[in-house]
Amino acid sequence: MQKIFIFFFFFCSSLLFAQDQQLAYDYFRKGEYEKSVTIYQKLYKQNNYNSNYLSRLIYCHQQLENFDETKNLIENHLSKYPSQIQFYVELGYNYELQHQQTKADFYYLEAINTLKSKPVYGYTIGRTFQKNHLLDYALQAYQITMELNPNANYEIQVAEIYGEKGELQNMFNSYLDMVEKDQRYATTILRYVGKYITDDAENEYNILFRKLILKRLQINPNNSWNQLLSWLFMQQKEYDKAFVQEKAIYKRTDSLGLNGIVNLGELAFNDKDYAATKTVFSFILENAEIQHYIIDSKLYLLFVDIETLDDVEVIDTQFQDLFKEYGKTSATINIQIAYADFLTFKKQEPYKAINILKEALKLRSSDFQKGAIKLKLGDILVFNNKFNQALIYYSQVQTSLKNHILGQEAQFKVAQTSFYKGDFDWAETQLKVLKSSTSQLIANDALELSLIISDNTVQDSLKTALKLYAQSDLLAYQHKNMQAIDSLNVLLNKFKGHAIEDDALFKQAKIFEELDLNEKAKNNYLKIIEINPTDILVDDAYYRLGELHTKQNNREKAKEYYQKIIFDFPTSIHLVDARKKYRKLRGDEIQ
């Protein structure tokens, strides 16, 4: 009985202690420092070796301007635990807050001098300086530690400090020094460098980073510098330049295989740079020995032809040639899926496509291959207005590949198909989850469709306008463009002034562009701007106008629309691209 009582006592004490910790932190986070101080004092007395409690207590006192109390607290702690020399920094900072710089510097130097004899405390001292924004001292602490202990590695912290100080050249050089010492850091540093790099080749940080890498490449050619340059050019969507770097890596050593070049080719294709795509996959065909590289390269070259050639019979013959060479096996599932897509959306032969995919499902294949087949089957069934059958296939993929990108894509297609059916509530339910998708593309698509639904249900409880818009959207998906245009005209005439008007105009304008009816597209974009200059689609309309006038070689008009985005829409997703194209039209020299 006594043991049970002791156990119960300690259990309750631990529970209360944990509750005090959480309560103190909650007050601390909310800025209720007086309440937080009371609890942290209690916690610190119970465990005065815990430096976290003391650090929080110091911060609270300083926010309340209890500087004398803070000084006594730190001095008493240092007398008990002299090895916790980071509190010399805290003591100095306490004086700095009172504008007593001489005393502050005395204790900062005390911490630095102690560090020289005890470099084991390097990180703790450096971090404490850094936390209090004493960046020069933090830099000194890390550098001294690395000089005294060659095994200490604080290059990332040093680089971060240079970044905080705005010394970007020193920051980039620090990251590159890490790669110089160990090439395995080449991938690691991209996470940090990527915060400063944009897709604008004229961005000053992009230019600086490129120059620093090129300087090292000239002195010491190695794969790491080519790898970093390739990454930079890919961020800038300069795929031809990235290919030069990837080719240099491949030719210097083929131990890495062709994976990097394949990834580059896929990225170029997804970004519709078909010239670069063709160059990359032609190179792979010339050098590949493994069959899947060869098949994938031929397929991507065929994809380029699908996008750039108008003769569907020529494309069909190319597919047949691939099947003759490699057969319809699990190794060619991607080709079978692509052929089914081509038959449906280019040749208007969906039933033939469905049969091909159903046969493909019988092949021995992975769950991911089966998922891809079912997604395409669903797409073709939607094309045929077989919504319920499509939803079955999409739901199967969503369930079987729940945490995979294919599962998230299937869930979006469930939402989209429900939207086409007019089941807006169920579509919204799916879209709410997808707004936080790990795929930025899916998250953006989900947000866009969700906004269309939510913005157009307030005024119209029967959702009549939204249903008509969904029907028009489906017609566009089915490549029934003229019917979609007519349907949107009905909507625009019937619901003039309705919230859906701008969405309908934008959707119709995109269809006009597909049909090369560019003047009609321009009129729609101008109407969107006229209806409401602050509408969410206005920057998109300006950007499309810039693109259309660029296409027609009307440089001055294109500049006018790009400039509008630059000055009036600083948060637009088109800002970087608009600035780049504006400068190009203006004749700026690209460095």
Image: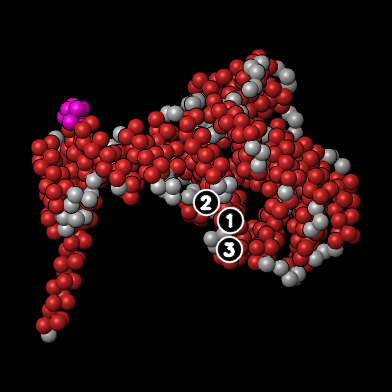
**10 Å crowding of disc 3: few (<14), some (14-19), many (20+):** some
SS at circle 3: loop
Mark 2 to mark 3 CA distance (whole Å): 14 Å
Percent position of residue 371, x then y = 65, 62
> Disc 1 marks which amino acid?
Ile
- Residue 102 sits inside the magenta stretch: yes
Give the Cα distance between marks 3 and 1: 8 Å
Q: Which mark is residue 191?
A: none
Left or right of 477: which side holds 286?
Answer: right
Q: Nearer the viewer, residue 590 or 521?
A: 590
- Mark toward the start of the polypeptide (2 vs 3): 3
Q: Dot 1 lies on which element?
A: helix
User: Would you name the residue on which mark 3 appears?
Assistant: 401
Helix, strand or loop at disc 2? loop
Q: Which residue is mark 2?
A: 438
* The C terminus: image quadrant: top right
Is residue 6 one of those drawn in magenta? no
Compared across the picture, whether 494 is left or right of 327 comes to: left
Tell me where the magenta segment starts and ends, as one range.
97-104
In this view, 277 is above or below 389? above
Contact flag, marks 3 and 1 (Cβ < 8 Å): no
Q: Which residue is mark 1?
A: 405
Q: Position of residue 19 (x, y in %)?
A: 20, 60
Looking at the image, residue 499 sits to the left or right of residue 54; the answer is right
Residue visible at 23% across and 46% down in the picture: 85
